[in-house]
Image (cartoon, rainbow, N blue to C red):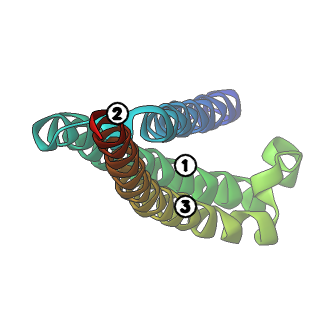
């Protein structure tokens, strides 16, 4: 593979990895907003309809990020190898340095960890908002019942 093709492929995969992760972040924030606004009002069946697709999407995005990350790590190793053989070819590329080349697998792993922690945090937030919303609804219903009783007396 030529130097240009290798650098172009690396940049393409890096962009796809970034785009995939940002899509997950957009869905994560939509889930958090939905949890804040309507979690306490949803019935159990609707909770499953909201949480189920979010879980599937999180799993799919994690696998996608893992796949792209694996490919980027492989390309970084190849860039490092070609740059070591001929320093004038890909020596300018950031992954041609040993430090940055060794960080690519760590970045890949950290993206998965961040995704999983975000998923767990979103579920905790969602179900906490559901609990709080249900408690507020119960309090509101009790106040309404008390006001109705006072009107009767």
Q: Of callouts 1 and 3, which one flags the residue occurring earlier in the amino acid sequence?
A: 1
Q: Is residue 87 left or right of residue 46?
A: right
Dot label at residue 114 = 3
Q: Return the residue found at the far left.
A: 45
Residue for point 55% across, 61% down: 114
Q: Quadrant of the N terminus?
A: top right
Residue 58 on image: x %, y %: 34, 46
Residue for point 80% across, 71% down: 99
Q: How many marks?
A: 3
Q: Quadrant of the C terminus?
A: top left
Q: Is residue 19 above or below residue 133?
A: above
Q: Of callouts 1 and 2, which one flags the residue occurring earlier in the amino acid sequence?
A: 1
**47 and 73: which one is in front?**
47
Whole-angstrom CA distance, mark 1 to mark 3, is: 18 Å
Q: Residues within 10 Å of mark 2 (few under 14, many from 20)?
A: few
Frontmost of labels 3 and 2 is 2
Name which quarter of the figure residue 2 lies in. Answer: top right
Frontmost of labels 1 and 3 is 3
Q: Is residue 22 left or right of residue 53?
A: right
Whole-angstrom CA distance, mark 1 to mark 2, is: 71 Å
Disc 2 designates what residue? 151
SS for dot 2: helix
Residue for point 63% across, 62% down: 107
**97 and 41: which one is in front?**
41
Q: Residues within 10 Å of mark 3 (few under 14, many from 20)?
A: few
Whole-angstrom CA distance, mark 3 to mark 2, is: 55 Å
Disc 1 designates what residue? 72
Q: Of callouts 3 and 2, which one flags the residue occurring earlier in the amino acid sequence?
A: 3
């Amino acid at each position: 593979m030529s130097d240009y093709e290798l650098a172009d492929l690396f940049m393409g995969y890096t962009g796809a990895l970034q785009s995939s992760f940002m899509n997950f972040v957009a869905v994560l924030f939509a889930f958090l907003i939905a949890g804040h606004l309507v979690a306490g009002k949803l019935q159990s069946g609707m909770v499953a309809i909201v949480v189920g697709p979010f879980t599937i999407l999180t799993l799919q995005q994690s696998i996608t990020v893992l796949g792209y990350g694996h490919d980027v790590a492989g390309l970084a190793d190849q860039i490092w190898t070609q740059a070591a053989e001929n320093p004038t070819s890909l020596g300018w590329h950031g992954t041609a340095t040993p430090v940055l080349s060794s960080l690519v697998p760590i970045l890949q792993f950290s993206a998965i960890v961040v995704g999983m922690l975000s998923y767990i945090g979103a579920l905790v937030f969602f179900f906490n908002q559901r609990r709080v919303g249900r408690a507020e609804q119960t309090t509101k219903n009790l106040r309404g019942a008390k006001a109705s009783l006072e009107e009767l007396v």
